[in-house]
Amino acid sequence: MEKLSVIGIGYVGLVSSVGFATLGHKVVGMDKDKRKIEKLKRGELPFYEKGLGEYLVEVMNKGLLEFTDDVEYAVKDTRYIFIAVNTPMDEDGSADLSQLLEAGKSIGKYMNTFAILTVRSTAPVGSLEALENVLESEGKIRGKDYELAYNPEFLREGTGIYDFLNPSRIVVGADSPEIAEEIMKLYEKINAPKLKTSIKDAQLIKYASNAFLAARVSFINEIASICESMGADVFTVAEGMGLDPRIGRRYLSPGPGYGGPCLPKDLMALIRMSEESGYHPEFLEAIHRKNESQIRKIIWKVKGFMGGVLINKTVGVLGLTFKPNTDDVRNSLSIPIITRLLKMGAKVRAYDPMGNENAKSIFPDDVVICDTVKDVFKDADLILILTAWEEFANLSWKDMEGVVRNHIIVDAVGILRNKVPEGWKVWMIGRGYL
């Protein structure tokens, strides 16, 4: 059993805290958000994540996990300090390191024994050098008072704790092989491919992985448009492609594009890093442009069904989270799509099985967040499906016919591909007009 602390209890930090405790380590999770910490102390999750709550309660009952808002308590006498604060996208697309550097300053102030500071946050090349400068300003010398490592996470929202305990790989980057090996031993109970690298290599593994996933999404959306133009079915095409083991089926689901807290910001950060190093990444920029054009495409389909005019038209939106099985609305593509519909004069009524509460703090007051699916359909001129929740695939569209003004559906995720409702005009991504 090793004692370790996790600084920053957002999604990555909380899953990592629970995961390390599940492996038998004594963990202190620290965050400056007092309300979040009080909630966690009661065994309550600050966000929805299937299965995580049960693991949280179990390790807390065993005395393996505690939470605090006191950074001194978290880092004092602690050898293993994991930093999992947010590194959001800055205005120019680069990573905003302010939270990482703030965490480093606080750690440097209270660190009283040799510690290995391991960054879990997605952080660009050069960020750990900046962290070293901050620690030096607090009188801490690398190699004498601490060492640095980088341990990227590959967690998917909705399956985070499963991914932590059953990872596709574990990567640890450190300038010292001994430090890398010491961090890797914290994962010794996990049977997975384990790779020890330099810090820069580990950072680029994370960014390159997410850029590749974004590329797959943009690629299948390109194929979807080709299928529509030729009268083919993108879902059958994707199935056939996925049978090739060199390709696989993952991330070949057409939709409004890639969103969420990781892929957009990590792709843009990699583009900016490349430019700063003197290389112009044209292929990565093309992935981003395709994603932007996919958003416009969905809006054009809605506008086309309405005769080109959205003023005083009501669009019922099903799905607000960036993907199903999460309550995360951050960077969901529903945000730019709904925002543009509003600017065109449309009225919007929306519903999500898990994301309603989070959506209320993001969308303007003129978006009506509905408590039920049926409320979305009330006097709607068109229904727009933006998230592939299973609930939407199983709707009784017959029961909704008398509620809406027009029987029109824009299915931007293909959730109705196996059950196209009769009596409705439907446009489906990758199939076209049905």
Image (spheres, rainbow, N blue to C red):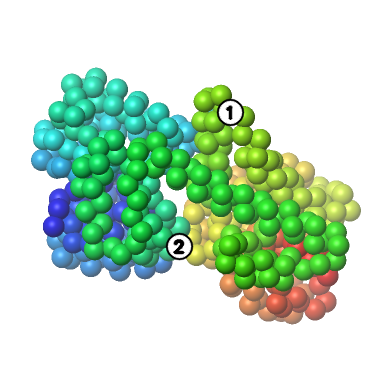
* Local SS, label 1: loop
User: Considering the image in quadrants, where does the N terminus appear?
Assistant: bottom left
User: Considering the image in quadrants, where does the C terminus appear?
Assistant: bottom right
Q: Earlier in the sequence, mark 2 or mark 1?
A: 2
- Mark 2 lies on residue: 158
Q: Quadrant of residue 43?
A: bottom left
Q: Residues under labels 2 and 1: Cα distance?
A: 35 Å
Q: Is residue 150 left or right of residue 220?
A: left
Q: Is residue 107 left or right of residue 286?
A: left
Q: Is residue 20 left or right of residue 289?
A: left
Q: Quadrant of residue 275?
A: top right
- Mark 1 lies on residue: 279
Closer to the camera: disc 2 or disc 1?
1
Task: From this view, report whether residue 122 is shown above or below residue 392.
Answer: above
Number of numbered discs overlaid on the protein picture? 2
Task: From this view, report whether residue 421 is shown above or below residue 58.
Answer: below
Q: Residues within 10 Å of mark 2 (few under 14, many from 20)?
A: some
Query: In this view of the protein, which residue sits in the foreground, 29 or 372?
Result: 29
Q: Mark yes or no: residue 362 visible.
A: no
- The spot of residue 288 in percent (x, y) is 65, 41
**What amino acid is at disc 1?**
Tyr
- The spot of residue 429 in percent (x, y) is 74, 61
For the point 27% across and 54% down, the residue is 17
For the point 41% across and 60% down, the residue is 168
For the point 38% across and 30% down, the residue is 127
